[in-house]
Amino acid sequence: MKLMTTCEETSILLSENMDVSLSKRKRLLLMTHLMMCRKCKSVKRQLYALREIFFGLGDAASADEIKMPESSKARIKKILDNTDFKNL
């Protein structure tokens, strides 16, 4: 049995863990890697923070709390009007 996952494998497990319950083996691999790797621990915090933000946006949008200022809309429209999308 593999005792340590790579950072890439851990990122996949982190993502998977957000959607489904991991097997005991996968949970153990994930926890072991996170105990040893500060970078992946930071990625985990960021993923969960983003998840909370996105879930909150749905609630805020349904409550009509998110409104873009007209000045921002105009600035974005101006940039889009001046962008040549053929060359992207």
Image (cartoon, rainbow, N blue to C red):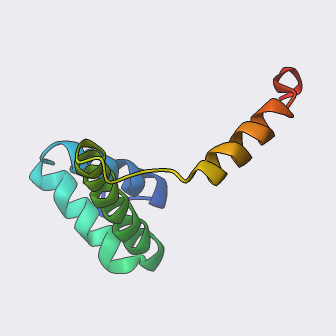
Q: Quadrant of the C terminus?
A: top right
Decide: is 69 above or below 33: above
- Please state if 9 lies on the left or on the right of 55 as rendered: right
Question: Looking at the picture, how far across and down is residue 48, in whole percent?
Answer: 30, 62
Question: Looking at the picture, how far across and down is residue 14, in whole percent?
Answer: 31, 55
**Which of the 4 image quarters holds residue 51?**
bottom left
Which of the pair 33/21 is nearer the observer?
21
- Residue shown at the point (30%, 78%) measured from the top left: 35
- Please state if 56 lies on the left or on the right of 73 as rendered: left
- Residue shown at the point (45%, 59%) measured from the top left: 6
Which of the pair 70/59 is nearer the observer?
70
Question: Looking at the picture, how far across and down is residue 66, in whole percent?
Answer: 38, 52
Give the total number of marks visible in the rendering. 0
Decide: is 25 above or below 3: above
- Please state if 87 lies on the left or on the right of 74 as rendered: right
Residue reaching furthest to the top: 86
Which of the pair 26/87 is nearer the observer?
87
Q: Quadrant of the N terminus?
A: bottom left
- Residue shown at the point (32%, 51%) measured from the top left: 57
- Residue shown at the point (76%, 34%) measured from the top left: 80
Question: Looking at the picture, how far across and down is residue 20, in whole percent?
Answer: 16, 42
**Which of the 4 image quarters holds residue 45?**
bottom left
Decide: is 42 above or below 26: below
Which of the pair 7/46 is nearer the observer?
46
Residue reaching furthest to the front: 70
